[in-house]
Amino acid sequence: MNYSLIHHANPYDNFNFQDYPLDLQGWGSQDPNFRKLIDELQPKLILEVGTWKGGSAIFMGEYVREKNLDCKIVCIDTWLGAVEFLTDKNDPERYISLGLRNGYPSVYYQFLANVMHQGLQDIIIPFPQTSVLAARFLMLNNIQADMIYIDASHDEKDVYDDINNYWNILKEGGVIFGDDYDEFWPGVKLAVNNFVIDNNLEILFTDRQWIIRKPKDVLPNLSENIYQRSRDNKKLALEYERDLFLYRAKYYDLEFRYTQICTDASKLNHELFSLQEQRERDARARDVLERELLTLQEQHEQEAQAREALEQELLTLQEQRERDAQAREVLEQELKEIKLSRGWKIISYYRNFCNSFYKKSK
Ligand SMILES: C[S@@+](CC[C@H](N)C(=O)[O-])C[C@H]1O[C@@H](n2cnc3c(N)ncnc32)[C@H](O)[C@@H]1O
């Protein structure tokens, strides 16, 4: 298979990969299991459902090249992220790494550049499509893969559908496998368990990865009876595990809600505390204002008293002035009279003098 099944032109042509420095951030991209499975299966076609920046695809691609295998790796991804990529807008590994340009992710270009930095254009073929549509397209074209790595959405139904759809594209004897079979991703664990139960299959585990092998059309060595019983027991065990998971999921949900309620309660407490503090501050400010008002009132009263006293003094002074004016008038009158009587005296004296002089001169 080459790129022309999916693309009209080579997707790497004319792409200026130097604009994007190498960035292989990813999750579980270098699990030793990739190499072990490649060694065992000597694959011609690997499908990866969920590629992100290409960490795991490049890890497999480099090994395929090192082993000189004639193998292609088709990377199926929308490069739009999954639900957990959208929830925390500050997550540098998910939301921010989507590299939104005018609201649309650009992480696909980081992936293309990473492949080119590592010189793996001849091995890795991008298929930007939803996992469902890509599976349908590959089926229509009768493509069969030796290894299929499922690492797209981690929601239970999506994982189940991905395994179920790609199971039909897997060669007999091939493996379908994935990451995150752990407590953090109960959806992955439940989907894998259910698929195995529904199809009477077995799961193999490595450290964190789950692996399901597609049996070749041969009967097992065990007698049919024993084989069937052991399968029934395994099925039962998986069913118990599924129930356990459901209860755990409910428990986590309740725990989550409880934490939220506690957080809300603590926020409310905090707000109440702030309000109480504010109220105390207001009461203190009010006390201060009341005291100031009292002082101002006292001052006002003192000033009114002082003003009254001054007005009283003014009144007294005016009365005094009036009395002084009257006394002055009396004095002036007396003075006038004195002056008058003195004038008369001088005149009569002078007359007497003139008379006596006259008599003498006769
Ligand atoms: C966990 S990341 C893959 C990590 C990658 N294998 C690595 O090594 O780093 C999941 C990827 O799945 C893609 N994805 C999620 N849902 C998808 C879907 N329904 N169809 C196609 N791709 C999907 C996301 O865009 C994201 O790039």
Image (cartoon, rainbow, N blue to C red):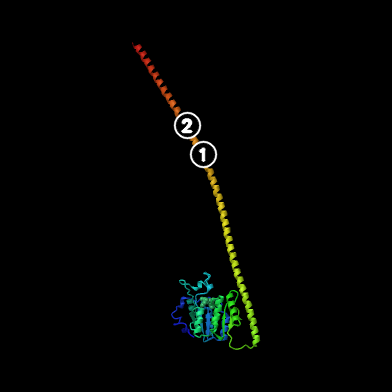
Q: Return the residue nearer the eye: 339 or 108.
A: 108
Tell me the tag on residue 221: none
Indicate the quadrant containing the C terminus: top left, top right, bottom left or bottom right. Answer: top left
Q: Residues within 10 Å of mark 1 (few under 14, many from 20)?
A: few
Residue 35: image location, x then y, percent: 56, 83
At 46% from the left edge and 77% from the top edge, which residue is drawn? 18
Whether the residue carrying mark 1 lies under 8 Å from ligand 1 is answered with no
Badge 1 marks a residue whose secondary structure is helix
Whether the residue carrying mark 2 lies under 8 Å from ligand 1 is answered with no
Residue type for callout 1 = Ala
Residue 31: which quarter of the image? bottom right
Above-or-below relation of 55 to 347 = below
Residue assigned mark 1:
306
Residue type for callout 2 = Glu
Q: From this viewpoint, which residue is outermost toward the top? A: 362
Residue 361: which quarter of the image? top left
At 52% from the left edge and 82% from the top edge, which residue is drawn? 47
Q: From this viewpoint, which residue is outermost toward the left? A: 362
Badge 2 marks a residue whose secondary structure is helix
Above-or-below relation of 354 to 5 = above
Above-or-below relation of 287 to 360 = below
Residue 116: image location, x then y, percent: 48, 80
Tell me the tag on residue 319: 2
